Amino acid sequence: MVVRFFICFSFILSTIYCFGQINVDKMRADYAAAVKDKKLCETNLKTLEATANTATEKGYLAAYQILWAKHMGNPFSKLGQFKKGKKLLESVIIKYPDNIDLRFIRWSVQTHAPSFLNYSRDRLRDKQFLVHNLYKLPNPEARKIIYIYLKDANSYLKGEHIFSQTELAELSK
């Protein structure tokens, strides 16, 4: 009887643990769409708020916090939400400066942040980091998602922020 109890208890704990994990690939894939899809942004934000533990998960939590600001109406609330996400993102990058997802998130946020927020100083450094390190991301699907995002960004980038053909070739490895 005691053995059955422990087996059932272990099964329940492992089930809770497995279902409590975040699908980072989904968060990464949904990232671009969440800019325009309020419900998707809210759902992913709630999931991340409840269970984000790793550096990458916390980075996507910060990203979705920043994206959520776009869906808010009150300008003061928007600014507060943006600052909350920015603070989290910067604190995680300080601890994990070589995390490719974190640098991608910061690059994308700084690329799209309005100039009055004065949040763009790391764009070129993050761009170069991504060009030289994206191939190190162990998940090929993750590399593909980030590569497509960066390649598509060229249509609205200007000057030194544009990815050259050589840089795009390096990113596609």
Image: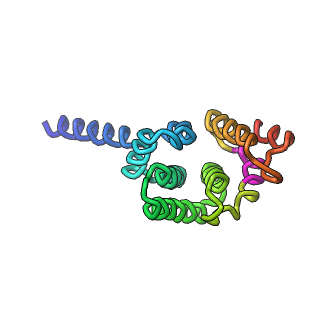
| Residue found at x 61% / y 56% | 113
Residue that sits furthest to the front in the current view: 74
Q: Is residue 130 magenta?
A: yes
Q: Residue visible at 75% across and 42% down? A: 154
Magenta highlight range: 127-136
The front one of 165 and 5 is 165
Q: Which image quadrant: the N terminus? A: top left
Q: Is residue 46 left or right of residue 120?
A: left
Residue 39 in picture, x, y percent from top left:
41, 39
**Viewer can see residue 135:** no
Furthest toward the left, the residue is: 1
Direction from residue 19 to residue 108 in the image, left or right: right
Which secondary structure class fits the magenta region best? helix
Front residue of 100/77: it is 77
Q: How is the image coloured?
A: rainbow
How many numbered circles does the render carry? 0
Q: Position of residue 28 (x, y in %)?
A: 55, 41
Look at 51% across and 41% down and name the residue there: 34
x and y percent of residue 139 in the render?
62, 37
Viewer-closest of 169 and 70 = 70
Q: Quadrant of the C terminus?
A: top right
Residue 24: image x %, image y %?
A: 51, 42
- Can you say whether 122 is above or below 158 in the image? below
Instruction: Name the residue: 28% across, 36% down.
Output: 11
| Residue 46 seen in render | yes
